[in-house]
Image: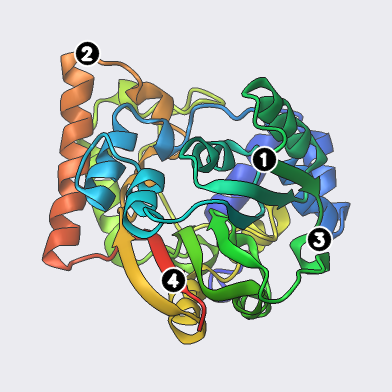
Amino acid sequence: MFNNLINVHDLSKFAEKIRQRQFDWIRSKLTFGKRKRIKQTWERVEEPPTNWWNVAGIGEHWNHLISGDPQVDYHEYITRKYFADRRSLLALSLACGSGERELRWTELGKFERIDAYDLSEARIECARSRAEEKGLGKIINYLVADVYDLEIRENYYDVILAEQALHHFSPLEEILLRANRSLKEGGYFIANEFVGPTRFQWTDRQLEVVNGILSILPAKYKTRWDNGSVKSRVFRPGRLSMVLVDPSEAVESSKILPLLYRIFNVIEVKGYGGTILQTLFSSIAHNFHSEDPETKNFIKLCFNIEDLLLGSGDIQSDFVVAVCQKR
């Protein structure tokens, strides 16, 4: 309807919110301004284990696709390959969230300081607490700020980090141009990002494969976290519902890679899937935490299906790690 501005599945979700008497949630989405809705979405610190990154073994799977070694994550892979002879690096992190990734970078011993910004006061407070617990509070400088309001010095940073941040920015080109100017000569821009369809407007092929897998999974693996209903099919979300729930979600995601290639010197791009697995496991990932043989076999089946389709070129990775340099 109207180029998928709204569809019947959105109306069903809305009706479910009414049945659950979530009237405050409904009111906030219909009456809050854009910036307030974004802040509301990202004020939460703890999240239920319902996303694809919560599936048992997913981290090792990503590592294998990116570094070739299930035990070497992309932070270590990049550090070994690009920062081996570097010390005392000065970094900027855009939309750092609760700060876990900055902690990981700091553990690798190459950074003198990381300036990390996020819009959410709750998440910055959580990040500061975690850094202090690990004795890293003097290295990571966590601050509350909107990245569009930052006064960033030119030719100042050795590294700029954008980890699951760029797909929330609009206008995106403005941020990337400023980042390029802020890097020193030879400086690195490192992105770990969702680069799939804007506003989650999944392709027909994605939906075909995801729904095919759902059709063969036992019902016990398809019960949703929030209400216990069975997830039997997935659909494209209406674009209006995406804007109402979180105006920043995947707002210009399909433009990320083209803009990186236009603005920076792109050195390396490593895809790690998510084209099928993200949508498949959304809201049901908690059913795949177990290490029992049956669950592990179903997880392996899902991983293999996506890997085969990626390897054949039938689909492209919706998630990538990109290493770029200042142009």
Q: CA distance from mark 3 to mark 2?
A: 44 Å
Quarter holding residue 70 = top left
Quarter holding residue 181 = bottom right
In the picture shown, does residue 262 fall above or below 138?
A: below
Q: CA distance from mark 4 to mark 1?
A: 24 Å
SS at mark 3 in the image: helix
Residue visible at 82% across and 40% down in the picture: 121
Q: Residues within 10 Å of mark 1 (few under 14, many from 20)?
A: some
**Amino acid carrying mark 3 in the image:** Lys
Circle on res. 139? 1
Query: Considering depth in this image, is 68 or 283 the residue closer to the camera?
Result: 68
Q: Which residue is mark 4?
A: 324
Q: Nearer the viewer, mark 4 or mark 1?
A: 1
**Amino acid carrying mark 1 in the image:** Ile
**Amino acid carrying mark 4 in the image:** Cys
Q: Looking at the image, tell me whether mark 3 or mark 1 is earlier in sequence order.
A: 3
Q: CA distance from mark 3 to mark 1?
A: 33 Å
Residue 83 visible to the viewer: yes
Q: Looking at the image, tell me whether mark 3 or mark 4 is earlier in sequence order.
A: 3
Q: Which residue is mark 3?
A: 34
Residue visible at 83% across and 46% down in the picture: 28
Lateral position of residue 284 relative to residue 137, left or right: left
Look at the numbered discs 3 and 4 and tell me whether their residues touch, using CB distance below 8 Å: no
Q: Which residue is mark 2?
A: 292
Q: Looking at the image, tell me whether mark 1 or mark 2 is earlier in sequence order.
A: 1
Q: CA distance from mark 1 to mark 2?
A: 41 Å
SS at mark 4 in the image: strand
Residue 111 is situated, as x and y percent measured from the top left of the image, at 56, 47
Q: Residues within 10 Å of mark 3 (few under 14, many from 20)?
A: some
Q: Nearer the viewer, mark 3 or mark 4?
A: 4
Residue visible at 25% across and 49% down in the picture: 67
Residue 82 is situated, as x and y percent measured from the top left of the image, at 37, 59
